[in-house]
Image (cartoon, rainbow, N blue to C red):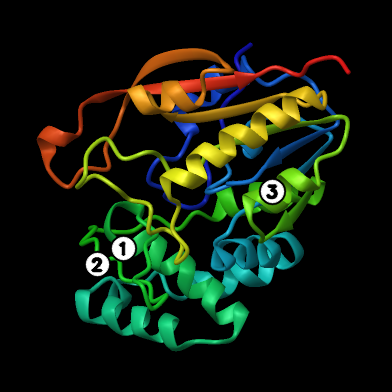
């Protein structure tokens, strides 16, 4: 019997919901799955590890996850009040977006983060250089309120530890018995196709190369690391020490319809070496 896949409660550009089955084939059994770039958490939600360490550099995202983990019922009741017809208008969206950018209370930011995610354009999470959320209004007929998905996340997250730190720090803290899945901001396919401003700090080509080096080091310490990225000449070069698999996937992040075709996705597997 095929197990039904579980959807994340956030819309997420580049989310891995449709690739979970292929990714699972490269993730061995372990005591703990570590994700330095957890994003919307589709791999976490659709795997069965005893425990998880879920990290992301986006503080708003991790704070939201901790709030849902510890108080889902209250959060769901409060968040629902933002999913009304009067809030699904451009002026309302822009007002609430400004409120989010001015807000300092973590709980209020978490409520507005979900609202912005579901009402903003295409599930994007993007900040300007000043750290202000700047995704435009999405103009959806009736944004979906993910109550069931929030409850599922809250239940599953009882097995998880959430952290907000750099990917370098996550690799420094790896322990025997863990396996790592990395879904970093992808290498752009063209100079105008970069969506890496998801966190204020960005993610450079130097970061991409350093991540590959850290994966090699973890591999030699007996820990398997799986990295996904665009399949390009450059990614094949930095992942040359890994076992590589390329698959075609649909991409729907482009603002132009003709940019929503299939692109090649690369899986780089650094299988643990016996120490």
> Which residue has dot 2 on it?
136
How many angstroms separate mark 3 from mark 1 (CA)?
25 Å
Disc on the earlier residue, 3 or 1: 3
Q: Nearer the viewer, mark 3 or mark 1?
A: 3
- Image-based side of 29 in relation to 73, left or right: right
Instruction: State whether residue 232 appears in this view.
Output: no
| Residue drawn 40% across the image and 86% down it | 99
Q: Is residue 31 above or below residue 81?
A: above
Local SS, label 1: loop
Q: Is residue 240 above or below residue 38?
A: above
The image quadrant where one finds the C terminus is: top right
Looking at the picture, tell me which residue is in the foreground, 242 or 87.
Answer: 242
| Residue drawn 88% across the image and 32% down it | 176
> Which residue has dot 1 on it?
120
Are dots 2 and 3 in contact, CB under 8 Å?
A: no
Local SS, label 3: strand
Are dots 3 and 1 in contact, CB under 8 Å?
A: no
Looking at the picture, tell me which residue is in the foreground, 232 or 183.
Answer: 232
> Which residue has dot 3 on it?
54
């Amino acid at each position: 019997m095929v197990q039904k896949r579980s959807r994340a409660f956030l819309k997420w550009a580049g989310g891995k919901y449709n690739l979970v089955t292929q990714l699972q084939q490269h993730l061995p059994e372990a005591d703990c799955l570590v994700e330095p770039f957890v994003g919307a958490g589709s791999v976490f939600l659709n795997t069965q590890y005893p425990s998880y360490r879920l990290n992301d550099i986006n503080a708003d995202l991790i704070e939201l996850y901790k709030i849902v983990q510890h108080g889902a019922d209250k959060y769901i009741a409060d968040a629902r009040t933002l999913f009304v017809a009067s809030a699904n208008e451009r002026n309302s969206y822009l007002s609430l977006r400004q409120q989010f950018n001015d807000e300092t209370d973590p709980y209020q930011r978490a409520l507005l983060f979900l609202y912005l995610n579901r009402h903003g354009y295409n599930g994007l999470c993007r900040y300007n250089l000043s750290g202000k959320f700047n995704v435009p209004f999405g103009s959806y007929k009736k944004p979906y309120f993910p109550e069931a998905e929030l409850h599922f996340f809250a239940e599953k997250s009882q097995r998880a530890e959430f952290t907000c730190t750099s990917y370098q720090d996550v690799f420094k803290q790896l322990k025997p018995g863990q396996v790592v899945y990395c879904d970093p901001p992808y290498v752009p396919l063209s100079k105008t196709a970069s969506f890496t401003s998801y966190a204020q700090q960005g993610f450079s080509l130097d970061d991409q190369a350093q991540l590959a080096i850290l994966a090699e080091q973890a591999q030699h310490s007996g820990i398997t690391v799986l990295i996904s990225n665009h399949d390009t000449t450059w990614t094949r070069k930095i992942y040359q020490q890994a076992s590589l698999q390329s698959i075609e996937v649909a991409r729907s992040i482009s603002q132009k319809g003709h940019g929503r075709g299939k692109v090649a996705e690369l899986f780089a597997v650094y299988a643990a070496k016996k120490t």
